[in-house]
Structure formats: C-alpha cells, structure tokens
Amino acid sequence: MLYNTDMIAKISGTVCDKLNTSVIVDVTQVGYEVFLTPRSFDAVMVADEIVFYIAEQIKEDEHTLYGFESLAERNMYYQLNSVSGVGPKAAMAILSHNEVNDIQSAIMADNITVFSNVSGIGKKTAQRIILELKGKLVSLPEKKTNPEDPAYLALLSLGYSAKDAASALEEVDSSLQTNERVKQALKGRVK
C-alpha cells in the first residue's frame, strides 16, 4: 500500500456542473473541480449525490484533484503514478481503459499489451510499469464484478463505492430483474 499526504482524501457532495473531463462537486456551498476517468465521468449526471476518493496532485502553480469510485482504484492510481515516466494523465488513461483487477493481472503475467494499447504509453513505459510494480501488488480479489451490470451501476449512483456495491450484490440472485436485485442488495446491506 502506498502512503501519501493528501489533505483531501474523500469528497461527498452534489455534482453541480460537468466540464470536459471533470465535474464540479458542491460540498456545503464550496465547489471542488474533480477530474475523473471517462468511465466515471460518463456515469455521473448533474444533480447526482456522489462520493469520490481523492488523489491530489500539487505543483507550484497547480492543485488538481482526481476522483475515484473506490480506494482500490485510487491506490492503483498512486502505484501507476509512482512509476518513472507515468504521470497523472497517463495513470488516469490506464485506469480509464482497464479495471484494477485487469491491471494487476497484466502486471503479474508480464502482459505489456494492456498498457501499450493505452494512448501515450509506449512499450518501454509498459515494461517499466511491470518491472517496478510486480513486487508491490497485493493479492487479487477473488470475485470480479461486471462493470456493465445495471444493478451494480445503480448502487454506484446511490453512493456505494465499487467494493461495497460488488459486496452487496454477491448474495443476490443474478437472474432476478435489475430493480429486484437492487432492492435485495439495499435490504441486505446498510451503508
């Protein structure tokens, strides 16, 4: 696990504006601009109540907030960003094209294609990611959630983290209608 000194670790609030690749989140009448992966950006709408785990990028002339749906995703961002030649934008690009489980699997299997297929990541950088992160990864989660599952997406829109949404749906029969799966997940798991 990477440790950091972020001042802002999590933001909860209402999306009041969507920009090109970021949203403005109103937190008690203060608006924070949070940059998201395209997948997360597409999933949120203006007026949504959201929770994002935050990674801060602080430079002399810039203070940028990057938002993630889960701590695992944020931790992977930090791990990718720690690799020489992989900055915040490249780390976000990798996360926008791949789930955390897929990135971990690619690193463990020496699969450079997962990284070199991302715009801006060349073969040498892909090899460096694998070399530098291979010994730092924790074990893979046992069960993978389908990011396209409507019930899973519904729970995310209700403010669940990706991990909590997946956990809440684990015991629910996947053959049920989406609205029934969401109801059962909500009954079985109180946030």
Image (tube, helix red, strand yellow):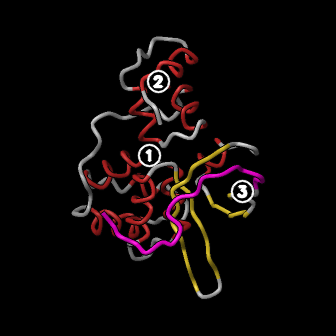
Q: At x 77% / y 52%, what residue is drawn?
A: 16
Q: Nearer the viewer, mark 1 or mark 2?
A: 2
Residue 23, label in figure: none
Q: At x 62% / y 50%, what residue is drawn?
A: 38
Frontmost residue, 124 versus 43: 43
Disc nearer the start of the sequence (1/2): 1
Q: Which residue is mark 1?
A: 99
Disc 2 residue type? Answer: Ala
Label 3, label 2: how far apart the Cα atoms are: 28 Å
**Mark 3 element type:** strand
Q: At x 47% / y 41%, what residue is drawn?
A: 162
Left or right of 152, for residue 132: left
Q: Is residue 111 above or below residue 156?
A: below
Left or right of 111, for residue 26: right
Label 3, label 1: how far apart the Cα atoms are: 28 Å
Q: Nearer the viewer, mark 3 or mark 1?
A: 3
Disc 1 residue type? Answer: Glu
Frontmost residue, 72 versus 187: 187
Residue 24 horizontal/vertical position (percent): 72, 58
Q: Which residue is mark 3?
A: 26
How packed is label 3: few (under 14 Cα within 10 Å), some, or many (20 or more)? many
**Mark 2 element type:** helix
- Range covered by the magenta-colored residues: 1-18
Disc 3 residue type? Answer: Asp
How packed is label 2: few (under 14 Cα within 10 Å), some, or many (20 or more)? many
Residue 8 horizontal/vertical position (percent): 53, 67
Disc nearer the start of the sequence (3/1): 3
Frontmost residue, 3 versus 98: 3
Residue 185, label in figure: 2
Q: At x 65% / y 49%, what residue is drawn?
A: 41
Residue 96 horizontal/vertical position (percent): 54, 51
